[in-house]
Image (cartoon, grey):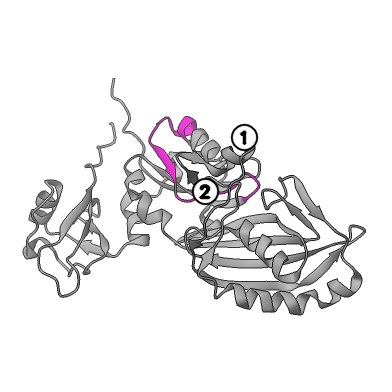
Amino acid sequence: MTRRPAPAGVVVVDKPAGLTSHDVVARVRRRLGTRRVGHAGTLDPMATGVLVVMVGEATKLGPYLTAADKHYDAEVTFGVATDSGDAEGVVLDERALSSAWIAGATARLRTALRDETRRTEQVPPALSAIKVAGKSAHARVRAGETVTLPARPVAVRSLRLRGTVDAIPKTGRALARLTVAAAKGYYVRALARDLGTSLGVPAHLSALRRTASGAFTLDQAVSLEALSDAHLMAVADAAVRVLPLVPLSPPGVDRARCGGPMRPEDFLAPVPPGVPSAWLGPDGVLVAVGEGPPDGGDGAPRVRRGFAVPPLDPP
């Protein structure tokens, strides 16, 4: 009996609310019948949208896919703060907002957003997966510990208020709808917290939908219920979405599969200096992720990560 090849590739899952990113990985494992599954950037259970899932050999692309900028549609509610910074947390502070405060909030929020785009460091929420002495911060908090996380470097690409800050009828609260683009490691929950601080009121993230992770967008996403092998993007296609493409000669393919050393004649185009690139064979298959020496530096390009030869489909 011929066994079918293990699945390999990348799929964009439209994560539903209520599942952790690990839950999504577990479901993909069951649906595709393989253990080698990972994701490229955690989404909180409350959040929905783009979760890039890597299967089989594509899991080797994790460092490059995870590093991509993320884009979100977010809703921030002013008037209530929670311990988690989102709608699923325990309420820590609550106050009714006056009509006068709400009337002036749009202008103040636009100023706060301009200030936020210049942020270079951010204090993550205490309820996060960041490890503290080998244990996640959220687990320590839930166990009764007081956790204060240090600020971490962040980069904000853009922040935009969609519309105005509007009163939520009969609640004494107000709602702002934002679009957010930021580099890896930026917490939109922390953004909501910090905007509340800037405006002098409690606030939390009340909705979040990731619309893109690097080159992977919501219009490419598939639901977990519909997911099948047919939705997997080839490993090579996924790699060239995030890395420069460098074609290999046939001898270069053989040398790269053996880990090098590489020679100038192995490449059919220049290897970008000092950055990872996707090395493809003449058949369009990803052979390796490699890296050229720094600009002006000596040495030959080196293989950073090799990829297995894709198996032939069974007859």
Q: Position of residue 5 (x, y in %)?
A: 31, 33
- Residue at mark 1: 143
Relative placement, left or right, of 56 versus 208 is left
The residue closer to the viewer here, 197 or 106, is 197
Q: Position of residue 158 (x, y in %)?
A: 56, 73
- Residue at mark 2: 42
> Residue at position x 19%, y 67% from top?
271
> Residue at position x 89%, y 57% from top?
171
Tag nearer the camera, 1 or 2: 1
Q: Amino acid at mark 2?
A: Thr
Provide the major secondary structure of the magenta segment. loop
Local SS, label 2? loop
Q: Which residues are magenta?
A: 29-47
> Residue at position x 69%, y 51% from top?
86
Residue 215: numbered disc: none
Mark 1: few/some/many CA within 10 Å (<14, 14-19, 20+): few
Q: What is the residue that sits farthest to the right in this orientation?
A: 170
Local SS, label 1? loop
Q: Position of residue 208 (x, y in %)?
A: 65, 56
Q: Is residue 121 above or below residue 149?
A: below
Quarter in which the N terminus is drawn: top left
User: Is residue 94 in sight in this rendering?
Assistant: yes
Mark 2: few/some/many CA within 10 Å (<14, 14-19, 20+): some
Q: Is residue 240 above or below residue 286?
A: below
Q: Is residue 32 highlighted in magenta?
A: yes
Relative placement, left or right, of 155 versus 101 is left
Q: Position of residue 45 (x, y in %)?
A: 62, 44
Q: What is the residue that sits farthest to the front in this orientation?
A: 146
Q: Is residue 94 highlighted in magenta?
A: no
Dot 1 and dot 2 residues touching (CB under 8 Å): no
Relative placement, left or right, of 143 versus 240 is right
Relative placement, left or right, of 29 versus 189 is left
